[in-house]
């Protein structure tokens, strides 16, 4: 079971940005005839909406939480384990997986690379973002992934959302939500669905700008609770489906949220561990 969990995490981490060939369903964001869509051409209104959502960012430099991790779509198995999420702004995102009180694996994102460790079988995968073509092509680096986990807006390729960047979003009102989309992203379109009252992001939907590619990658948020002076999601669900290979979802249920940046930010891998390549793991999954 632990081995399947390990390769599932690798697969999700390194294929999540094949979003232009995936298909995911999400609440209240369909394009049926019953859904009313209003295009807002007033740039002032769009900028005002973006500023309200951007202002909801956490001021804390570090966040930790206990989590229940659920994975589905790998080897015909649905897996569930406990874990711990540790995040330090502009430094690290780490998801530690535990079974019977012991760490059995972890997934760690830093500005330089991605690390996935399987402690049960003493093996690991380490890859730089530039080595993974679909991450590079989609413009999804550490800072974009950080924004996803912190429930924040981002523009692909930018480390922070600057004052100039705030003005790059278009606004559409759809199914009672404000849909904010950064302009001039040539390969993929990034649609942030925000609650117009709470100004929190409910969903990120990524689709190809190529009309021949019909799928999407989705990152959904739910279970908002007050944390750090703002509503913060305690339920996160990532899904990549319709790739023509295997569909994978990762769901996190957070609890015991704390503002904490005092933890070690880098994992040292023992010399006794065997390094595996991305291709080896994805090949085992038939991906």
Image (cartoon, grey):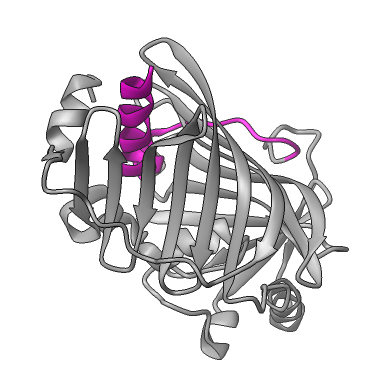
Using the rendered image of the protein, determine whether residue 212 is visible from the camera's viewpoint. Answer: no
Q: Which quarter of the picture shows residue 63?
A: bottom right
Q: In which quarter of the image is residue 282?
A: top left
Q: At 45% from the left edge and 12% from the top edge, which residue is drawn?
A: 77
Residue at 52% across, 72% down: 262
Q: Does the magenta stretch include residue 280?
A: no
Residue 251 spot, x, y in % from top left: 58, 35
Of 119 and 9, nearer the camera is: 119
Q: Tell me which residue sits at (38%, 36%) in the image.
A: 12
Is 231 positioned to the left or the right of 93 in the image? Answer: right
Quarter of the rendering containing residue 59:
bottom right
Pick the front one: 75 or 132? 75
Where does the magenta region start and end? 1-28
Between 194 and 68, the one lying in front of the other is 68
Q: In this view, does 260 lie above or below 70?
A: below
Height in image: 282 above or below 17?
A: above
Of the pair 226 and 44, the residue shown nearer to us: 226
Q: Can residue 31 be seen in this view?
A: yes
User: Residue 115: x, y in percent?
Assistant: 28, 50
Q: Disc count in the image? A: 0
From the image, give the main secondary structure of the stretch colored magenta: helix
């Amino acid at each position: 079971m632990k081995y399947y969990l390990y390769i599932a995490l690798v697969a999700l981490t390194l294929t999540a940005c094949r979003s232009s060939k995936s298909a995911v369903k999400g609440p209240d964001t369909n394009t049926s005839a019953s859904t009313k869509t209003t295009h807002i051409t007033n740039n002032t209104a769009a900028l005002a909406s973006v500023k309200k959502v951007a202002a909801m960012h956490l001021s804390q430099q570090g966040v930790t939480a206990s989590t229940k991790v659920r994975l589905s779509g790998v080897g015909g198995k649905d897996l569930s384990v406990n874990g711990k999420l540790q995040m330090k702004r502009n430094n690290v995102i780490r998801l530690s997986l535990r079974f019977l009180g012991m760490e059995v694996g972890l997934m760690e994102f830093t500005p330089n690379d991605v690390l996935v460790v399987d402690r049960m079988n003493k093996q690991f995968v380490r890859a730089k973002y530039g080595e993974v073509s679909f991450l590079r092509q989609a413009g999804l680096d550490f800072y974009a992934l950080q924004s996803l986990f912190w429930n924040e807006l981002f523009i692909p390729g930018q480390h922070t959302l600057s004052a100039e960047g705030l003005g790059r979003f278009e606004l559409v009102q759809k199914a009672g939500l404000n849909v904010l989309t950064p302009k001039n992203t040539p390969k993929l379109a990034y649609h942030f669905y925000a609650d117009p009252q709470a100004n929190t992001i409910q969903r990120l939907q990524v689709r190809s700008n190529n009309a021949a590619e019909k799928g999407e990658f989705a990152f959904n948020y739910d279970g908002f609770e007050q944390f750090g002076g703002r509503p913060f999601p305690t339920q996160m669900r990532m899904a990549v489906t319709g790739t023509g290979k295997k569909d994978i979802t990762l769901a996190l249920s957070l609890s015991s949220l704390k503002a904490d940046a005092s933890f070690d930010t880098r994992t040292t891998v023992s010399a006794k561990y065997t390094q595996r390549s991305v291709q080896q793991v994805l090949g085992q999954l038939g991906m």
